[in-house]
Image: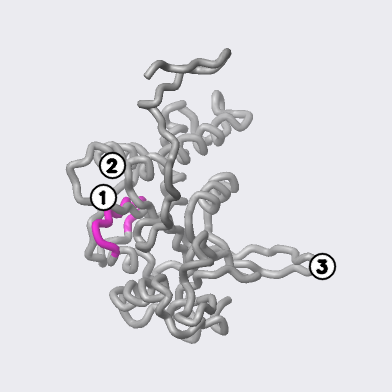
Amino acid sequence: MAAVKKEGSPIITSSEISLPNKKTQPKQNFSEFRWLFYGTKKIGKTALLSQVPNTLFLACEKGDNAQELYSVETFTWSAILKTLALLKQGNHNYKHVVIDTADVAFDHLIRHICKENGVETINEGSLSYGQGINKSRLHFIRAMNEFVYAGLARTILLHERRIEIQDNIGRTTEKITPLISDKKIEEYINSDVDGIIYMFYHKNKRYMQVRGTNGVEAGTRMSHYKFLTPTGEPVFCVPMGDSQEEAWKNLQIAFANKQEKTFEEVAK
């Protein structure tokens, strides 16, 4: 077929792109989506995600010694890029990667760029006037996207923080959000993931909050067809039980709209 070219536009042939003739169908498996899990340290984020089949962890900081999982020590930005390159080559069974944690990964990147440019901080020398931090953001976002472009599902882990916000009538309240040091990277992650799940304790029991409230950042893009009770009520929290296996099982049950209770009263 001959290529058609409009004035001032590139040539596009039918072999390069085609128009769809049917709608895409929503994904149904939990591990096919992009997720952000966050919560207090040692609550079981890594242990929970270790239950997802065909998962590789990028351990950006030490702390996985007590877990049974597939993990690569990525204590530098170069190690993260080398792991990404190996995943893009194929010849492996991994379908899902976990960045543990993204805030530390971003710190690795900043140190890498500073070292490349012979400076101590990201705002010195040739990196001053915002050039260094902007370069860091660009490289981080590009790398996180490359995992997805390689055909991998991706989960980001973060710790929690508590911030003060003002409500619509000027009162100051507290909100729990993911901890990330850079505002632009926080905005990227929050907009890029399909769901944000907060893990917390309530009366010495662990829960996962899947819907946001005034006090907690959480929620999913698929709230209209996932995390519902069998009668169609929105599920707010999922109990984690006493083990990582039970937590993963309960999460799948809730995602499949088979959890009987909403646990709205537990939500923060």
Instruction: Judge by depth and name the residue closer to the eye, 122 or 88.
Output: 88
Between marks 2 and 1, how big is the CA–CA gap? 8 Å
Element assignment for label 1: strand
Q: Where does the image place residue 220, in percent across and percent down from the top left?
A: 51, 62
Left or right side of 5 for 97: left
Query: Which residue sits at x=36%, y=77%?
Result: 250
The kind of residue tagged 3 is Ile
Residue 169: mark in rendering: 3
User: Can you identify the residue that label 2 sits on?
Assistant: 83
- Precedes in sequence: disc 2 or disc 1: 1
Instruction: Judge by depth and name the residue closer to the eye, 253 or 248.
Output: 253
Query: Which residue sits at x=40%, y=79%?
Result: 258
Camera sees residue 108: no
Are the residues tagged 2 and 1 within 8 Å (C-beta)? yes
User: Can you identify the residue that label 1 sits on?
Assistant: 72
Neighbourhood count class around disc 3 (C-alpha, 10 Å): few under 14, some 14–19, many 20 upward: few
Confirm whether the magenta stretch covers residue 93: no
Instruction: Judge by depth and name the residue closer to the eye, 231 or 78.
Output: 231
The relative height of residue 29 versus residue 121 in the rendered view (above or below) is: below
Q: Quadrant of the C terminus?
A: bottom right
Left or right side of 48 for 172: right
